[in-house]
Amino acid sequence: MRTTSATALVVLLLLLAGCSSRGHGDGGPITLRFQSLAWQQESVAANKELVQEWNATHREVKVKYVQGSWDTVHDQLLTSFEGGEAPDVIHDASDDLADFAHGGYLADLTDLLPAGLEADIPRRSWETATFGEGVYGVPFLQEPRVLIANSTWLRTAGVRVPTPGHPWSWGEFRQVTKRLSGDGKYGVAWPLKEPVSATLNLSLSAGGRLFHRGADGKVTVRFGPGDAVVPRTVHDQVTTDHSAPASTLGSGGSDTLPGFFGGRYAMVPLGFSYRQQIVQQAPKGFHWEVLPAPAGAGGLAQGVSPQTLSIAAGCPHKKEAAAFIDFLLRPKNMVRLALGDWMLPTGTRALKDPALHTAKNGWATGTALAAHLRPAPAQSVRGYPEWKDKVATPAFQEYYSGSIGLDDLRGRLEKDGNPVLARYQR
């Protein structure tokens, strides 16, 4: 009994020590843990500088920077939530929040955020972090998918160069890539190691929806004409026109850059932030530019899953955590974070900053696309991760490689996929 009591006392003292580091019952400053997923050198520097600036001007609330990783964040957060050791302020992406929000791990920010911050970010961005009646993250950085093009190649071929005001249609894009191909070279290289999100997000431009929510609130998959435009374009470029190589379909974006620099591909569809790698890696004298993705019935619309800042439900100092988020996302600070990550801010005031409207490195083209960004189609679909991994990813991979046809793709997504989603909506 004496041993048990001693053990219990040690455990109690350890728990009190852990609490004091967060709550500081000794009268010292509060310490908030901020887990950042920044990984690029400029982005890490911007985040750490902002933490230092906060700490220098806030005596009662200090912030400790914690480095996280995009590769492991979901499992790491789940473990930390269940163990009661979650960071107070959490950097993540909106498409990773649904399970955490429904599981009660994240604080509802509805009554915590300043009115100015709420008003500055467009409603369409807030929708990406809204689940049910609550808001569980502040969307602050977003990344459109663009075409990175070899300027010299396009102008030598005499093709029309698209602009945000006059983009290519999907049909014109296909014709241009055919014109640019031949002699072992390709008009475009599609890096589709993760084919589902890229396909669904770009399909908004063609009027695709795929996920349809009924009057009962339940979601089903219906693959309509608008959903077929982008998949058919990629499929035909690979299997019919031979204007895109099959070899890159299983590649990530970075994997295509050597071939792009070497003159094998005229264009590569990539996320906007890949521009930093291109600036760092492009050989001297290589001329490139940023073009808008093709447009269809939905114009330049495309889906995005913004990066977000959330507060853990277990954080004992939510008001202070919200104040820190408000500081991080002041317009000038949001611009610093966007420039560090080579992405776009969500805030309307930040988007007006002259640094984001320069022609250099395609900033102006990307900023012109900001008004056309919409929540990713799968943003609030329960069961999407399993549907994507078990049904959609292999189906799209087989379709793009030519192993199955469009009707087979439709059948796989609907007939095989809807039972998966149904299990999460009972």
Image (cartoon, rainbow, N blue to C red):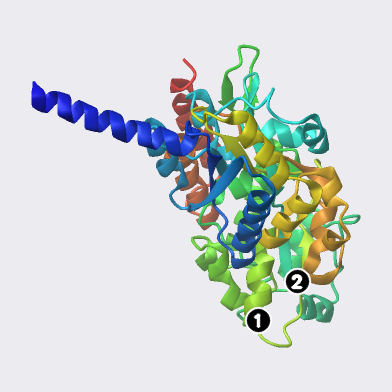
Furthest-top residue in view? 216
User: SS for tag 2?
Assistant: helix
Q: Is residue 229 visible?
A: no
**Residue 38 occupies which quadrant of the picture?**
bottom right
Percent position (x, y) of residue 189? Answer: 62, 66
Percent position (x, y) of residue 53? Answer: 68, 54
Q: Is residue 355 visible?
A: yes
Q: As drawn, is 255 to the left or to the right of 361?
A: left
- Determine the residue positioned at 65% across, 12% down: 215
Furthest-right residue in view? 165
Q: Residues within 10 Å of mark 1 (few under 14, many from 20)?
A: some
Percent position (x, y) of residue 376? Answer: 65, 39
Percent position (x, y) of residue 39? Answer: 55, 60
Placement of 407 over or under 173, stated as above or below: above
Placement of 71 over or under 15, stated as above or below: below
Label disc, if present, on residue 263 of the rendered structure: 1
Q: Which residue is mark 2?
A: 179
Placement of 55 over or under 264, stated as above or below: above
Question: What whole-number distance in Å separates the C-alpha atoms at marks 1 and 2?
Answer: 15 Å
Q: Nearer the viewer, residue 398 or 269?
A: 269
Which of discs 1 and 2 lies nearer the camera? The answer is 1
Q: The N terminus lies in which quarter of the figure?
A: top left
Q: Nearer the viewer, residue 72 or 386?
A: 72
Label disc, if present, on residue 166 of the rendered structure: none
